[in-house]
């Protein structure tokens, strides 16, 4: 049988400082970019406005398209080539145009159509796609999306708190919060347009990353029950190593799916696939380098009561020293089973 | 062994049921038609494609309260819903969806509409009929200087260069209005010409240059090519604010007499004397003098009200306003009018009158509706999405199969068998819940193929661990499933909870994604745990004393 990363004993947690610095730098970069260039790039669904995808029979010039729109009073629309030389997307998303859609969402779309009719001739082009959203709908959707994110996190927290003890739950949820920040930074830095589908991708990413954390924590819980006399630091490393083949394999199959989507599923789904591909890496990273060190930290700050599970409470105490001096030279000493000392 | 038989029986039964659910067939279904439930024979498609995949139009409509507040919006929408539905039914689209969402919105979905303009016109045609008295107080003339000022100040940079001139130039224009007669319409176009040029420079000429008085009080004429410019100016919030109180401007017909066509514009009293709410019947007709007309009749209450209101307005002109557009030239009220009247549609074919009568009859909306959201996808774009999505699906499945078999060999093959069942089951679950397959749903499906094997991976890794501890094959398999169970349940439940939240608060396509995810997880739980376990049991029962397991 083929085995990858079988019976490994990597000291993953050792690198938590470096990992923390890397992720904090990434997040700070993302947030700084928020300050410099403003918020993320929201789609029509959230801002309101009109998006039209138009395919001309003959190759059309973006300049001619722009002047036709400007003449009709649709100013500052974003015009992008889409696919071939005769296909364009038109985004009219600025506040004036959104306001014009308050009376009827179709207002701007109709103006664009008549402008194109006048300039290029009716029937000389096909409107492949229209999305026109009035300002009210946009506001409602933004609220709904924010609520969904919040609720999803709360529901996950409640479930984890129920299934695991609260220390695991808190560590898992804090690591979910980390995932949200990292993903936002990623979306901002790659300038992905945030649509409802992207909100869906973020939620799926959070779920997927949560799963990964659950798998490792499940193993930690099991290893703690076995009452091995070792610091939590080692239990965590052991659990991560034991679940490593599963992690590698599952992440590989998931990556196979997201990359297939990224490369073959077309432009509409590409942002979704991009965020999900990033999500696979976030999940791997955060369950090992965010959730696990957080659990260590929580155990150290709030040690367990020495009830019956003596071994567990001692692991907490030892974890403290381990977390403070997480270097390899102290390692061999801790490798010695507690009973032998 | 009987245990094994039951397991195999269950899998076979589910597979049969799934294939049955996925097989296209003709069924008799209860359908909601025009308010009533009827039995109908329909061709049942296994998985209905969403509008984003088959092309079509999605509209969401809400009550337009810009003119007057509506007390009970939910109730008004319920009544409007019936009207919209009967119109859509007459429109003749296959499987349209017309439903109320929440308390303040109506969703209309028209699959496969390749002429979005016509569909939009039918749904948007509110057939909201109002009778409004035209303005007699020359309110527009009084407001014009102010309008000009606003248009000029909004003109921007270009206006600044001409700033000195317009104050002198615009002022004499207003008196011009009064001296002009109807016949001046033609000569006015030359003036309007210069007006529109100035307008392009930044609205410097202002509003008064674009408008000439018509033949009755409150009627004005605008050269056709100046219409977009004037429309834009009139939409400015400042202009809206400067509108004379209790008055509003409405567009009328395009009149193409003479060389240059022009459009009528009317200043009318905002308060309608009566609305289409009381309309009882409407039918098209041809009148030798007036041409195409639609005759209508009010009900008793409407007739009473109409009589008393027209009685108060004798000698005034009454604009018949359909969806904020004045139909024909407003007639003068000679005496109180009863329950009957007519709409003149000069120059329009009888077909147009038939359409109008039909919309008026089948549905003059009790409240004005406005389109809050439109999504329209061309059929070719939808087909393209399906093709690409399917390709991604095939590639994802192929890669996953290669990885699983390459890594787990025999056991991987079992997992792949389960994966194929997984895809069938997921589609069947979606189909039996009448779920609609959307583009994000397709993405969710592809993604779930990648994630679905996770449970198997967990189990296989556990079995390997047990084998490493020197357990027999049979025990290792048992223990492997047992130990992986808690992790599998926890991850599944956590994901289902997230998907449920997404379903609750998402809309349209994203709901499709959530449904696919939930169906995928449920099917994956069953396939990875139950089906693969059964496969192992079959294998164990056939190979007595299995010493090694290819995993």
Image: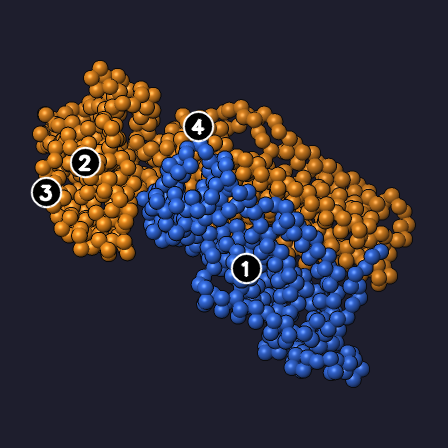
Chain colours: A blue, B orange
Q: Earlier in the sequence, mark 2 or mark 3?
A: 3
Task: Residue B33: give its label.
Answer: 4
In the rendered image, the vertical position of residue B476 relative to residue B7, given as above or below? below
The quarter in which the N terminus of chain A is drawn is bottom right
Indicate the position of residue B158 as horizontal and vertical percent values. 27, 53
Given residues B89 and B426, the one toward you in this image is B89
Q: How far apart are marks 2 and 3 (CA)?
A: 14 Å
Q: Position of residue B154 (x, y in %)?
A: 25, 53
Residue under mark 4: which chain is it in? B
Q: Is mark 1 on a helix, strand or loop?
A: helix
Residue depicted at x 82% and y 50% = B409
Q: How far apart are marks 4 and 1 (CA)?
A: 48 Å
Mark 2 → mark 4, Cα distance in angstroms: 54 Å
Q: Do the residues labelled 1 and 3 touch (CB within 8 Å)?
A: no
Q: Do the CB atoms of the residues marked 4 and 1 lie less than 8 Å apart? A: no
Q: Which of marks 2 and 4 is nearer the N terminus?
A: 4
Look at discs 2 and 1 and give the one toward the viewer.
2
Label for residue B175?
Answer: 3
Task: Judge if badges 2 and 1 mark residues of a common chain.
Answer: no
Determine which residue is flagged by label 1: A190
């Amino acid at each position: 049988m083929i085995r990858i990363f079988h019976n490994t004993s990597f000291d993953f947690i050792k690198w938590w400082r470096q990992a923390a610095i890397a992720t904090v730098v990434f997040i700070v970069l993302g947030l700084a970019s928020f300050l410099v260039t403003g918020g993320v790039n929201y789609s029509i669904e959230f801002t309101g406005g009109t998006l039209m995808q138009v395919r001309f029979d003959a190759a059309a010039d973006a300049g001619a398209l722009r002047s036709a729109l400007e003449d009709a009073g649709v100013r500052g629309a974003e015009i992008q080539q889409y696919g071939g030389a005769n296909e364009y997307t038109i985004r009219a998303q600025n506040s004036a145009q959104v306001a014009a859609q308050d009376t009827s969402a179709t207002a701007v779309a109709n103006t664009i159509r008549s402008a194109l009719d006048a300039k290029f001739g009716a029937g000389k082009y096909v409107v492949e796609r229209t999305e026109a959203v009035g300002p009210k709908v946009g506001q409602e959707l933004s609220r709904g999306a924010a609520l969904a994110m919040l609720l999803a996190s709360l529901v996950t927290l409640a479930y984890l708190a129920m299934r695991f003890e609260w220390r695991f739950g808190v560590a898992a949820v804090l690591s979910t919060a980390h995932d949200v920040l990292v993903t936002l930074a990623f979306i901002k830095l790659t300038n992905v347009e945030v649509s409802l589908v992207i909100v869906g991708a973020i939620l799926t990413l959070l779920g997927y990353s949560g799963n990964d954390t659950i798998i490792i924590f499940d193993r930690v819980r099991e290893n703690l029950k076995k009452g091995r006399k070792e610091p939590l630091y080692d239990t965590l490393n052991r659990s991560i190593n034991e679940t490593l083949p599963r992690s590698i394999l599952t992440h590989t199959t998931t990556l196979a799916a997201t990359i297939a989507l990224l490369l073959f599923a077309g432009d509409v789904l590409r942002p979704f696939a991009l965020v999900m591909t990033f999500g696979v890496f976030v999940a791997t990273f955060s369950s090992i380098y965010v959730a696990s060190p957080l659990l260590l930290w929580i155990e150290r700050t709030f040690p367990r009561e020495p009830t019956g599970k003596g071994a567990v409470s001692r692991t907490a105490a030892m974890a403290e020293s381990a977390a403070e001096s997480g270097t390899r030279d102290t390692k061999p000493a801790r490798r010695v089973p507690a009973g032998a000392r | 062994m009987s245990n094994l038989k039951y397991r195999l029986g269950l899998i076979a039964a589910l597979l049969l049921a799934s294939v049955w659910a996925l097989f296209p067939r003709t069924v008799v279904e209860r359908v909601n038609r025009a308010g009533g439930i009827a039995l109908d024979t329909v061709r049942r498609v296994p998985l209905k494609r969403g509008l984003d995949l088959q092309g079509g139009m999605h509209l969401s409509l809400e009550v337009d309260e810009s003119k007057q507040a509506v007390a009970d919006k939910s109730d008004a929408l319920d009544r409007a819903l019936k009207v919209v539905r009967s119109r859509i039914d007459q429109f003749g689209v296959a499987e349209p969806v017309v439903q109320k969402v929440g308390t303040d919105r109506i969703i209309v979905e028209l699959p496969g509409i390749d002429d979005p303009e016509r569909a939009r016109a039918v749904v948007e045609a509110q057939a909201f009929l109002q009778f409004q008295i035209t303005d007699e107080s020359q309110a527009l003339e009084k407001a014009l200087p102010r309008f000009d000022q606003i248009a000029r100040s909004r003109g921007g940079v270009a206006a600044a260069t001409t700033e000195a001139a317009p104050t002198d130039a615009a002022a004499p224009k207003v008196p011009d209005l009064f001296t002009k007669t109807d016949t001046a319409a033609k000569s006015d176009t030359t003036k309007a010409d210069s007006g529109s040029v100035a307008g392009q420079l930044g609205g410097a000429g202002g509003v008064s240059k674009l408008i000439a008085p018509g033949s009755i009080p409150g009627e004005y004429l605008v050269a056709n090519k100046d219409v977009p410019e004037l429309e834009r100016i009139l939409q400015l919030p400042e202009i809206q604010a400067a509108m004379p109180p209790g008055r509003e401007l409405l567009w009328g017909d395009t009149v193409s007499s003479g060389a240059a066509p022009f459009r009528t514009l009317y200043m009318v009293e905002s308060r309608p004397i009566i609305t289409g709410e009381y309309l009882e019947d409407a039918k098209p007709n041809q009148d030798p003098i007036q041409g195409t007309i639609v005759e209508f009749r009010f009900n008793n209450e409407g007739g009473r009200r109409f009589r008393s209101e027209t009685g108060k307005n004798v000698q005034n002109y009454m604009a018949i306003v359909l969806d904020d557009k004045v139909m024909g030239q407003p007639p003068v009220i000679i005496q109180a009018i009863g329950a009957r009247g007519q709409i003149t549609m000069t120059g329009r074919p009888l077909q147009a009158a038939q359409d109008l009568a039909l919309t008026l009859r089948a549905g003059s909306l009790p409240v004005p509706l406005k389109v809050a959201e439109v999504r329209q996808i061309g059929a070719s774009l939808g087909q393209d999405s399906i093709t690409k999505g399917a390709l991604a699906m095939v590639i994802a499945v192929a890669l996953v199969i290669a990885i699983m078999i390459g890594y787990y060999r025999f056991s991987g093959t079992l997992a792949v068998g389960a994966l194929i069942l997984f895809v069938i089951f997921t589609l069947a679950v979606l189909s039996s819940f009448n779920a609609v397959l959307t583009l994000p749903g397709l993405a969710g499906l592809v993604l779930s193929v990648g994630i679905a094997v996770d449970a198997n991976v967990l189990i296989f890794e556990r079995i390997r661990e047990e084998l490493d501890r020197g357990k027999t094959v049979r025990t290792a398999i048992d223990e492997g499933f047992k130990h992986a169970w808690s992790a599998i349940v926890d991850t599944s439940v956590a994901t289902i909870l997230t998907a449920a939240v997404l379903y609750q608060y998402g809309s349209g396509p994203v709901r499709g994604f959530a449904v696919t995810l939930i169906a995928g997880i449920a099917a994956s739980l069953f396939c990875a745990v139950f089906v693969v376990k059964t496969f192992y049991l079959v294998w164990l029962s056939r190979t007595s004393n299995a010493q090694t397991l290819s995993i």
